[in-house]
Image (tube, rainbow, N blue to C red):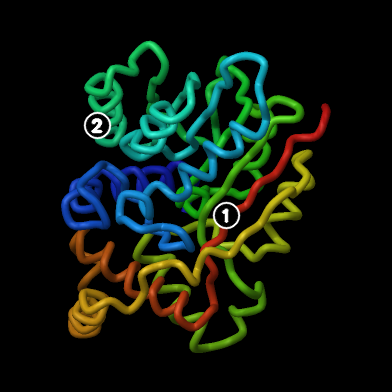
């Protein structure tokens, strides 16, 4: 499959499913990310913005002399950008492959009164426009795994992030790059990748290698898997539905999403995949 074809598959996946994510997912607030029920989290709103709050803390800890510029690589409908702006004064850019998400993001930014501070463009974060403003911090929440090429992602991020700036990825990572030799694990990993159009499902060692080659130094890594909602009653129902439909699920965009999500639940519960928050710092050029 060519890079253009992969991009089209990912774009179609989100064009078709964003409405389902927003109405049937974790929240009606615009977040299409997972809820993180870490220690101290007492409400669903806090759980949904847990990663956003960690990014806000990184911005606060850096004590910038001027208003920082941030870039969301795979911004969805700009929920994270708008939330961060509400907590910490920034300028920001959201990037998404999805035309539908881009339009919804622009509407959200305008509705919340951030049009002078934030914007969204439809583009591929593995092939960024050349004239983008350099970022003090760039982040990718549950979008890195869709990258057509992990090497291209980090190369583009390296060009985007200022020396000394930060790159944050929160996503799914293999617990062992040799899991492909485990027949049962390989079966469920393939289902996850097929259902959610996943192209860059890597181990910690693999992703750190790409990051290092692109001029980044790892400064933080946290496994958030224990704080996810796994094996809820709805998940058992979805698992039963997908088991009955099997590959026929892939013929419908919503059922395809459930097919991949069910496999992800299995992979997380079996610890073949971990959901991790990672931070790198860009070294001097």
From what the image shows, is residue 87 above or below residue 212? above
Task: Give the percent coordinates (x, y) of residue 221.
Answer: 66, 57
**Left-right relation of 100 to 6:** left
Task: Give the percent coordinates (x, y) of residue 32.
Answer: 32, 49
Q: Residue at 39%, 20% (x, y): give it.
A: 119
> Would you say residue 5 is visible in this rendering?
yes
**Left-right relation of 7 to 236:** right
Mark 1–mark 2 Cα distance, whole angstroms, equals 26 Å
Give the mark, 1 or 2, whose residue is nearer the N terminus: 2
**In front here: 50 or 126?**
50
Task: Give the percent coordinates (x, y) of residue 25.
Answer: 24, 57
Q: Nearer the viewer, mark 1 or mark 2?
A: 1
Label 1: which secondary element: strand
**In front here: 70 or 215?**
70
Label 2: which secondary element: helix
Q: Residue at 57%, 15% (x, y): give it.
A: 131
Please identify the residue farthest to the top as the structure is shown: 116
Q: Residue at 32%, 79% (x, y): give it.
A: 231
Q: Quadrant of the C terminus?
A: top right
Mark number for residue 277? 1
Which residue has dot 2 on it? 104
Label 1 crowd (10 A; few <14 / some 14-19 / many >=20)? many
Which picture quadrant has residue 209?
bottom right
Label 2 crowd (10 A; few <14 / some 14-19 / many >=20)? some
Q: Residue at 26%, 19% (x, y): give it.
A: 110
> Would you say residue 197 is visible in this rendering?
no
**Left-right relation of 266 to 156:** left
Mark number for residue 214? none
């Amino acid at each position: 499959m060519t890079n253009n074809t992969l991009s089209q598959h990912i774009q179609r996946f989100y064009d078709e499913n964003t409405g389902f994510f927003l109405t049937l997912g974790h929240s009606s607030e615009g977040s299409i990310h997972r809820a993180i029920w870490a220690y101290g989290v007492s409400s669903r709103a806090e759980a949904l913005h847990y990663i956003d709050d960690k990014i806000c803390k990184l911005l606060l800890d850096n004590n910038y002399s001027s208003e920082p510029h941030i870039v969301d690589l795979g911004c969805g409908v700009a929920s994270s950008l708008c939330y961060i702006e509400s907590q910490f004064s920034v300028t920001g850019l959201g990037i998404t492959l999805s035309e539908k998400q881009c339009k919804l993001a622009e509407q959200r930014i305008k509705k919340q009164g951030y049009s002078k501070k934030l914007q969204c463009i439809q583009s591929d974060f593995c092939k960024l426009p050349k004239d983008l403003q350099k970022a003090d911090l760039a982040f990718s929440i549950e979008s890195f795994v869709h990258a057509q090429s992990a090497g291209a992602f980090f190369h583009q991020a390296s060009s985007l992030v200022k020396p000394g700036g930060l790159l944050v990825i929160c996503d799914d990572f293999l617990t062992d790059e040799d899991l492909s030799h485990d027949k049962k694990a390989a079966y469920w990993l393939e289902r996850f990748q097929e259902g959610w159009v996943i192209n860059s499902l890597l181990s910690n060692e693999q992703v750190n290698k790409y990051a290092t080659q692109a001029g980044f130094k790892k400064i933080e890594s946290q496994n958030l898997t224990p704080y996810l909602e796994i094996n809820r009653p709805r998940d058992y129902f979805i698992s039963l539905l997908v088991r009955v439909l099997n590959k026929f699920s892939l013929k419908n965009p919503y059922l395809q999403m459930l097919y991949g999500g069910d496999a992800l639940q299995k992979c997380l519960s079996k610890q073949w995949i971990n959901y991790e928050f990672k931070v790198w710092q860009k070294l001097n050029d």
